[in-house]
Amino acid sequence: MIYLKAGREKSLRRRHPWIFSGAVERATEQPKAGDTVEVRDTSGKTWARAAFSPQSQIRARVWTFDPAEEVDAAFFRNRVMRSLAVRESLPAAKHSNALRLVHAESDGLPGLVVDRYADVLVAQFLAAGVERWRDPILDALAELTGCEAIYERSDAETRKLEGLEPRAGFVRGNRAAARCPIIEYGLNFRVDVEQGQKTGFFLDQRENRQRVRALAAGREALDGFCYTGGFAINALAGGAKRVLAIESSAPSLEVARENLAANAVDAGKAEFVQADAFAHLRTLRDRGAQFDLAVLDPPKFAPTAAQAKNAARAYKDINLLAFKLLRPGGLLATFSCSGGVDAALFQSIVAGAALDASADAKIIERFSAAADHPVALEFPEGEYLKGLLLLKT
């Protein structure tokens, strides 16, 4: 068990699932990584049962706030079953065969991410607790989803903070998953679950891609960080006059071109360019290029608040260039998936970019992650994706 310092149980009263190392007074019985421990205050009252992680700043992640609840294989099966039931009730389940099935802390399974791509699951075990219970969790996922295969992508940098080595490969079943076909609102995409970013595709942007599709008719569009073409192809499907899509990764562009060919859109209206987005946006500015719609969905610039300063410069740079490239009346859909940059800071950065670009702009919509990426009320850290739809006046 672990004992908290005086007054440090306040976050547990609010049911926040993280216990930081600085809040822990002492641990008894020398718990090992992934062990389930009781969490007690100075009076000896038990507040929760949590997974212990001796190397992480997040020293324990709460499994349950019911001290009497057993944390065993049945516990994890029930949590997975509950998560699946939530997804089955979502409207997106009728429009796509690709969904996030487990969203870590917000589904009561800290450190576990599971995405479904048709008949393949991709699982990430990112914390010591779920690592300890990996096999029962995989058994539950295989049983409850009936999927043909499960591919593990436990290769994120966050595993290092938990003292865990990276691991990737098939853990249940086996099939060629370098091009896993999915359907999203009638569009076809190929997902590389083995080599693609994150788990292979950005499912959190599903509804935002659909929104860009609805806004694209008659517009000349720019997709600054196109990855495998999600926003670009949605813009074409929505009737864009032309789309210029930029991506630095050759393998990602290869998949993007496959995705383009897999859909009933006019491929002649699309241009995919392999280039550094920052440099190419400057080149476009210098050429006097102009667009009516721009999408900026860059990679994570600031995983934590410590990187926020450097990230702010990067976000400002790309947004300033986008404002320069937009015609009056043009729309900018701009995003940040950086946990270290909150919504207020992101808006401030984009406002500074508009000011430096001598552009007047108004927020007409706000974007967030799709509903299969829920945010628990007591865990605001789960709200990592934020975005703005701006009208340049």
Image (cartoon, rainbow, N blue to C red):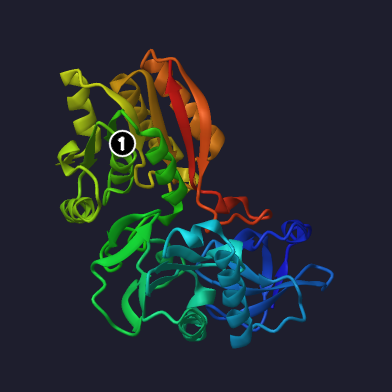
The residue that appears at 32% across and 48% down in the rendered structure is 230
Q: Is residue 161 left or right of residue 271?
A: right
Q: Residue furthest front?
A: 264
The quadrant in which the C terminus is found is top left
The residue that appears at 37% across and 74% down in the rendered structure is 119
Residue 373: tell me if it is visible: no
Residue 197: tell me if it is visible: yes
Q: Nearer the viewer, residue 185 or 382?
A: 185
The quarter of the picture where residue 42 lies is: bottom right
Q: Horizontal and vertical percent for residue 80?
A: 57, 75
* Three-letter amino acid code at the position of disc 1: Gly
Q: Horizontal and vertical percent for residue 216?
A: 35, 34
Q: Horizontal and vertical percent for residue 30?
A: 60, 81
The residue that appears at 16% across and 20% down in the rendered structure is 287
The quadrant in which the N terminus is found is bottom right
Q: Horizontal and vertical percent for residue 391?
A: 44, 23
Total numbered circles: 1
- Tag 1 residue: 239
Q: Is residue 4 left or right of residue 155?
A: right
